[in-house]
């Protein structure tokens, strides 16, 4: 079975090289690298089965990250031989031997693994995540980008004035979930067909905070697809619960004991021994 690995990467090209090198010819890799990345890509260019794109300058939580993901989905879907699709970051890494990875995906080729839940959701703040899409966000995230103070003021002003943006799709039934997933070709087709028929749907997510965590789950959860509420990723969210911890060799036992297909997040240097251990598993 041929599979697609869709990757959004920002930096740490040596780590990306390790990730790309882990897959064989049964995989096509579609990689979007942040347009602002200053590192050399010479080691990646010209590789067989690797498709590189540098279309968007992406800030964390920005609408352009959603655009990059949809672009990779469209590019990969054009290859009719690809039957299973994984979205990961450039700092992810497979948790198991490639033969075991392939066997799992072959056995579950019709299953769609993604985190999903209806909004509002208690873990997504005081408004259950609805604030991300109901208000106009001039910047993608009010705590991590320049203009944070102004963004926070504008969102609070809209809240006080009772200004809320409409969501005229699926009867207003919104869903959220983690950005990354492993899904069937059918699931990719459901998204792309919906976007083709509703040209304004994607644009509705402009000026939305972390749009990719709402846009795609909302389509999938309002479809007839069978969904498994598990995105098959090992992530240690650290003490603050907001930022993935860089994984090291000390995390190896927890990773292999999980049911995850990928572990995040890895970094050159700090994760080198862990990657070696996973390769030798």
Image (tube, helix red, strand yellow):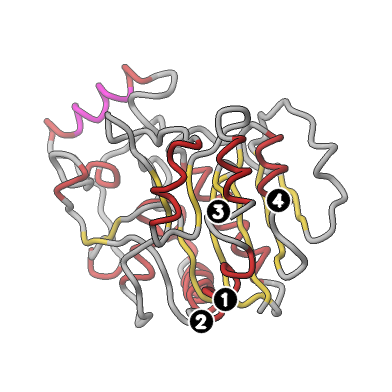
Q: Residues within 10 Å of mark 4 (few under 14, many from 20)?
A: many
Residue at the disc numbered 1: 103
Which is closer to the viewer, label 3 or label 1? 1
State the CA–CA distance, disc 3 to disc 4: 18 Å
Left or right of 266, for residue 166: left
Residues marked 1 and 2 touching at CB (< 8 Å): yes
Farthest-out residue, right? 46
Residues marked 3 and 4 touching at CB (< 8 Å): no
* Residue depicted at x 13% and y 39%: 126
Q: Quadrant of residue 41?
A: top right
Mark 4 or mark 1: whose residue is earlier in sequence: 4
Residue at the disc numbered 2: 107
* Residue depicted at x 57% and y 69%: 100
What secondary structure is the magenta-colored segment mainly? helix
- Magenta-colored span: 151-158
Residue at the disc numbered 3: 69
Quadrant containing the N terminus is bottom right
Residues marked 4 and 2 touching at CB (< 8 Å): no
Mark 3 or mark 2: whose residue is earlier in sequence: 3
State the CA–CA distance, disc 4 to disc 2: 23 Å
Which is closer to the viewer, label 3 or label 4? 4
- As for residue 150 lying within the magenta part, the answer is no
Image vertical order of residue 248 relative to residue 211, above or below: above
Mark 3 or mark 4: whose residue is earlier in sequence: 4
Q: Secondary structure at mark 4?
A: helix
Residue at the disc numbered 4: 20
State the CA–CA distance, disc 3 to disc 1: 26 Å
């Amino acid at each position: 079975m041929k599979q697609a690995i869709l990757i959004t990467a920002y930096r740490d090209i040596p780590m990306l090289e390790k990730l790309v090198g882990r897959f064989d010819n049964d995989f096509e890799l579609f990689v979007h690298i942040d347009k602002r990345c200053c590192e050399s890509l010479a080691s990646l260019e010209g590789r067989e089965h690797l498709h590189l794109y540098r279309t968007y300058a992406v800030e964390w939580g920005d609408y352009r990250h959603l655009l990059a993901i949809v672009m990779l989905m469209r590019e990969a879907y054009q290859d009719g031989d690809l039957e299973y699709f994984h979205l990961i970051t450039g700092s992810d890494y497979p948790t198991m031997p490639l033969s075991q990875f392939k066997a799992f995906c072959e056995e579950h080729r019709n299953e769609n693994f993604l985190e999903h839940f209806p909004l509002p959701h208690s873990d997504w703040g005081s408004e259950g995540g609805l604030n991300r899409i109901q208000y106009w966000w001039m910047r993608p995230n009010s705590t991590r980008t320049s203009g944070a103070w102004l963004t926070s003021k504008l969102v609070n002003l809209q809240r006080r004035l009772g200004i809320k943006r409409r969501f005229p799709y699926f009867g207003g039934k919104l869903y959220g979930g983690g950005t990354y997933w492993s899904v069937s070709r059918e699931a990719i087709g459901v998204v792309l067909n919906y976007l083709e028929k509703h040209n304004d749907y994607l644009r509705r997510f402009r000026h939305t905070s972390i749009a990719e965590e709402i846009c795609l789950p909302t389509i999938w959860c309002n479809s007839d697809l069978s969904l498994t509420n598990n995105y098959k990723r090992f992530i240690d969210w650290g003490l603050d619960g907001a930022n993935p911890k860089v994984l090291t060799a000390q995390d190896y036992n927890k990773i292999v004991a999980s049911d995850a297909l990928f572990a995040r997040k890895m970094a050159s240097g700090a994760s080198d021994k862990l990657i070696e251990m996973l390769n030798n598993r």
